[in-house]
Image: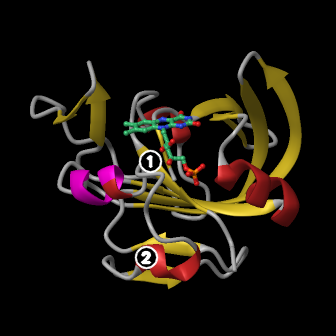
Amino acid sequence: MTVSSLSALSREPLLVGICLQRQSASLALLKESRTFAVSVLTASQAEPARRFADPQRPRGRAQFDLVDWEPDPYSGAPLIADALSWLSCRLVTTAAAGDHELLLAEVVEGVARDGHPLLNFGGAMAAVTTLEAAAPPAHRATPDLSTVAVDTPLTRCEGESG
Ligand SMILES: Cc1cc2nc3c(=O)[nH]c(=O)nc-3n(C[C@H](O)[C@H](O)[C@H](O)COP(=O)(O)O)c2cc1C
């Protein structure tokens, strides 16, 4: 599914937070599997961002038929090809947040690439063309999440959903 923000919560351990609607089918899957993968999309990936936000999309692996992907070595969940960043996550805890649920997860592994993120502003997908290239990460095992904009749409790919 597509989510609008991923918040960097802690550096040591490396923790991130996402907020999912209570009725989300993906939320139930994620709470069951306890592991998941995040693909932070690039400015040229608005189409998959829209597709993974469609509640009528096919379920399970079929929803990934129109994108190139590879399995996350940690969670087995699909990682979308050419994404700006990949995060392998382990669910740590959840908390009620109104009609949403806040999920706190540890980033177990990560990959970061150069490029421009896909943004969501005012209901539209956008790219920031004035963004200066960020310094390359010191190492690629643990990406610096401060370079991921809070409003970056990203697609969280749940594990097997049948
Ligand atoms: C740009 C964008 C951002 C979104 N952000 C969120 C979000 O942060 N949390 C959420 O629960 N749904 C969000 N959605 C809606 C879900 O992607 C959508 O409801 C999706 O169908 C949920 O997946 P599910 O059907 O597997 O539950 C967003 C949609 C778009 C287009």
Q: Would residue 48 be counted in the magenta stretch?
A: yes
- Residue at image location 52% in from the left, 53% down from the top: 1
Residue named by callout 2: 64
Q: Secondary structure at mark 1?
A: strand
Q: Nearer the viewer, residue 139 or 119?
A: 119
Q: Tell me where residue 113 appears, x and y as whole percent.
A: 35, 60
Crowding around mark 2 (Cα neighbors within 10 Å: few <14, some 14 to 19, many 20+) is some
Q: Is 89 displayed left or right of 127 in the figure? A: right
Residue range highlighted in magenta: 46-50
Crowding around mark 1 (Cα neighbors within 10 Å: few <14, some 14 to 19, many 20+) is many
- Going by the numbered disc 1, the residue's amino acid type is Leu
From what the image shows, is residue 24 above or below residue 97? below
- Residue at image location 68% in from the left, 72% down from the top: 159
Q: Outermost residue, left direction?
A: 129
Q: Tell me where residue 35 appears, x and y as whole percent.
A: 78, 63
The image's colour scheme reads secondary structure
- Residue at image location 88% in from the left, 46% down from the top: 92
Residue named by callout 1: 154
Quote the CA–CA distance across marks 2 and 1. 15 Å
